[in-house]
Image (tube, rainbow, N blue to C red):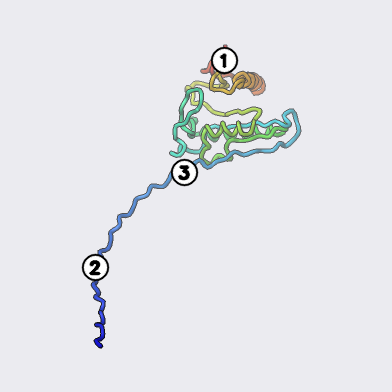
């Protein structure tokens, strides 16, 4: 019988054209808030044994774009997540000053038996955001939360003042405003009497808002 014909595959060359790729330009992500809180154990027994005090050294190292996001700061105020703060004419930055004061205060409080939590762990990192700092105090169920700042006041201004919430502030936890005002009054009076530093020359009576 006849044999079937053997089929020979036909090969058709395919011409390929290289695909030109366009490099994608990437923008580095901004540095993210890098700091966390630090808890410092008591160094001795004293009148504050068993108490937890949060000290907030205001501001941070730089004005990274990652922390310039506008957030709800409470009391109807919206502001940047965090900034470097003000500085003296000689270039001494607020974040450096508040870090120094907070650590000095922490050492004293710890000798009196308090556990002290600092809202930032160093003076070389970014953040945390002001809303995170407040939450640190809430999470710790702190007996007191004190935020430390320097003020970009008038060139001839001097002295110190204490900030406190107005009475019956709807943005403060129930009862919180009254308790905060007790702490503010104590700090206002005792700090002045102990250090001799005068009340602010540009904030009435060394309180903001004024209570008189």
Report the front residue among 171 and 205. 171
| SS at circle 1 | helix
Q: CA distance from mark 2 to mark 3?
A: 48 Å
Give the farthest residue toward the top: 212
Number of other residues with Cα within 10 Å of mark 2, as a class: few under 14, some 14 to 19, many 20 or more: few
Residue lying at 48% horizontally and 33% vertically, measured from the top left = 81
Residue 107 % position (x, y): 67, 34
User: Which numbered disc, 1 or 3, marks the residue that appears first in the sequence?
Assistant: 3
Check residue 15 in the rendering and tell me which mark sits there, or answer none.
Answer: 2
Residue lying at 61% horizontally and 22% vertically, measured from the top left = 176
Check residue 31 in the rendering and tell me which mark sits there, or answer none.
Answer: 3
User: Which numbered disc, 2 or 3, marks the residue that appears first in the sequence?
Assistant: 2
Residue 112 % position (x, y): 72, 31
In this rendering, the label closer to the viewer, 1 or 3: 3
Number of other residues with Cα within 10 Å of mark 1, as a class: few under 14, some 14 to 19, many 20 or more: some
User: Which numbered disc, 1 or 2, marks the residue that appears first in the sequence?
Assistant: 2
Q: Is residue 159 left or right of residue 29?
A: right
Q: What is the tally of numbered marks visible in this picture?
A: 3
Is residue 175 shown above or below 142?
A: above
Q: Which residue is mark 1?
A: 205
Q: CA distance from mark 1 to mark 3?
A: 41 Å
In this rendering, the label closer to the viewer, 2 or 3: 2
Give the farthest residue toward the right: 45
């Amino acid at each position: 019988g006849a044999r079937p014909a053997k089929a020979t595959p036909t090969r058709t060359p395919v011409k390929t054209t290289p695909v030109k790729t366009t490099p994608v330009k990437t923008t580095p992500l901004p540095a993210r808030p890098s700091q966390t809180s630090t808890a410092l154990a008591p160094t001795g027994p004293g009148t504050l044994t068993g108490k937890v005090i949060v000290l907030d050294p205001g501001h941070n190292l730089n004005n990274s774009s990652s922390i310039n996001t506008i957030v709800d700061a409470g009391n109807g105020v919206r502001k940047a997540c965090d900034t470097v703060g003000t500085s003296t004419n000689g270039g001494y930055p607020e974040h450096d000053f508040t870090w120094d004061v907070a650590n000095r205060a922490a050492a004293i409080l710890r000798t009196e038996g308090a556990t002290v939590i600092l809202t930032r762990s160093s003076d070389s990192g970014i953040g945390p955001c002001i809303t995170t700092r407040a939450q640190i105090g809430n999470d710790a169920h702190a007996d007191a939360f004190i935020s430390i700042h320097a003020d970009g006041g008038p060139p001839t201004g001097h002295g110190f003042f204490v900030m406190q919430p107005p009475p019956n502030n709807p943005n403060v936890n129930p009862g919180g405003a009254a308790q905060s005002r007790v702490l503010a009054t104590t700090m206002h009076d005792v700090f002045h009497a102990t250090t001799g530093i005068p009340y602010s020359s540009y904030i009435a009576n060394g309180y903001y808002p004024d209570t008189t």
